[in-house]
Image (cartoon, rainbow, N blue to C red):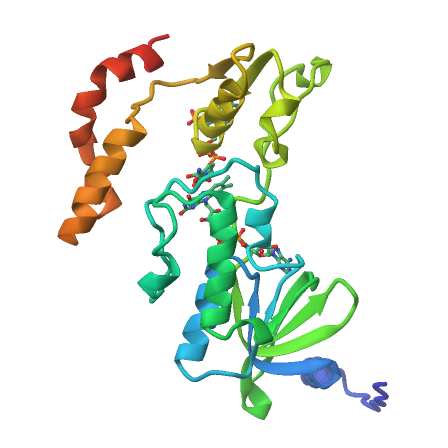
Amino acid sequence: MLNTIFAKSDDDDDDEFQRELEAIKRREEVRKVDHRYGAVVIGAGWAGLGTAAALRHSGVEDFVVLEKGDQVGYFWSTLWNHLRMNSFRHELWNTPREMTAEMEDYKPKSQVMEYLNAYTDHFGIRKHIQFNSEVKKIRRTSLKDVGNDEFWVVEMSDGSKIGATNLAVATGLNRLKYVPNIPRIKQYGGNMLHSGQYQDPREFPGRTLVVGCGNSALEIAGDIAAESKENHVTLLVREGRHFVKEKTKLWWERLFALCGAYTESFFLDDYRTCRKDLRYHEQVASP
Ligand SMILES: Cc1cc2nc3c(=O)[nH]c(=O)nc-3n(C[C@H](O)[C@H](O)[C@H](O)COP(=O)(O)OP(=O)(O)OC[C@H]3O[C@@H](n4cnc5c(N)ncnc54)[C@H](O)[C@@H]3O)c2cc1C
Ligand SMILES: NC(=O)c1ccc[n+]([C@@H]2O[C@H](COP(=O)([O-])OP(=O)(O)OC[C@H]3O[C@@H](n4cnc5c(N)ncnc54)[C@H](OP(=O)(O)O)[C@@H]3O)[C@@H](O)[C@H]2O)c1
């Protein structure tokens, strides 16, 4: 409880008075936090786990990872069942090769979860993770006067507060769903959902329209089409696209990886490797 009595009468001292009041409030706020850590990492996904491993690698042990879900890679665990990574191997920094040796180059979701868990244990991160802990608000409190600059107050959904000298926000971008404002979309009476809610192709028998042509759209369209010959899937694409068959891409990626010279940007640059797939490209991209 903060009890402060100020007995000021001179108006000219108002600014100083406000500053002093603010400083007292901040000091009180810092005192009130339930725990204090050298570092707080928000999110136990790819980025959060990588940050935690880097902290441990640098000898930092005074940190906590706050994860709103009940497991590491929680966001990935919510994605659809037949999902595969589209990036080749996709090993995190400093991951021992043995950890992924038995895994496929394009890992299915189950192997991604397995990998993230193995990574967590290998780098001794699990003991630092606090699951089912959603961060609601973060605020920076500057306490220069007590030699403690950039102090973060992290407010949890249960009302508790955690203090941190350093903060890493690793809450991801792709988990935020975006549905464009398409006129009269609300009048559509069929089964409609965002790709982030898609789980199983069996829920989409018959005709399906997939809006968009990013990786989500292409994977989901393929998933539904592959489920049954009766399924008819149409992609709604608003601009032209270049397509590269997975086989071609894989072939080049393996070659580059073998030479130790693999870079995705090299592969994607001016579609050098697209030539072999031109006929396929014409078929798919023709209006
Ligand atoms: C379907 C799909 C497939 C993808 N495939 C690939 C791929 O093959 N290769 C690739 O490189 N990228 C891929 N991506 C991009 C993908 O988003 C990133 O690779 C990866 O998930 C990003 O990791 P991240 O740690 O930044 O975020 P996330 O994996 O989203 O992790 C964020 C974590 O923060 C937690 N969190 C969020 N808010 C809070 C909060 N307020 N309090 C506490 N915790 C919180 C979440 O629960 C989650 O665990 C894909 C994306 C999608 C949607
Ligand atoms: N297997 C995998 O590894 C996998 C699977 C899914 C996603 N991902 C990753 O996740 C991230 C997000 O991918 P995403 O496919 O979900 O999103 P995205 O790449 O942003 O694609 C969104 C698509 O929606 C279209 N679109 C947006 N507004 C529209 C409108 N008003 N009308 C018609 N079309 C509209 C866009 O068209 P325009 O292109 O014309 O703008 C685009 O084709 C990417 O990094 C991707 O690589 C990976």
Above or below, 20 relative to 217:
below
**Residue at (61%, 44%) from the top-left corner?**
78
Residue 2: image x %, image y %? Answer: 83, 86
Residue 35: image x %, image y %? Answer: 68, 81
Near-viewer residue (102 or 257): 102
Whether residue 26 is visible: no
Above or below, 42 relative to 242:
below
Q: Residue furthest left?
A: 259
Above or below, 268 relative to 190:
below
Q: Residue furthest front?
A: 102
Near-viewer residue (191 or 80): 80
Instruction: Please tell me in which quadrant of the rendered image residue 11 appears.
Output: bottom right
Near-viewer residue (20 or 168): 168
Q: Quadrant of the C terminus?
A: top left
**Residue at (64%, 66%) from the top-left corner?**
138
Q: Quadrant of the N terminus?
A: bottom right
Whether residue 178 is visible: yes
Instruction: Please tell me in which quadrant of the rendered image residue 101 appears.
Output: bottom left
Residue 283: image x %, image y %? Answer: 31, 11
Above or below, 284 relative to 75:
above
Q: Is residue 240 left or right of residue 60?
A: left
Instruction: Please tell me in which quadrant of the rendered image residue 10 appears.
Output: bottom right
**Residue at (66%, 65%) from the top-left corner?**
131
Residue 116: image x %, image y %? Answer: 49, 58
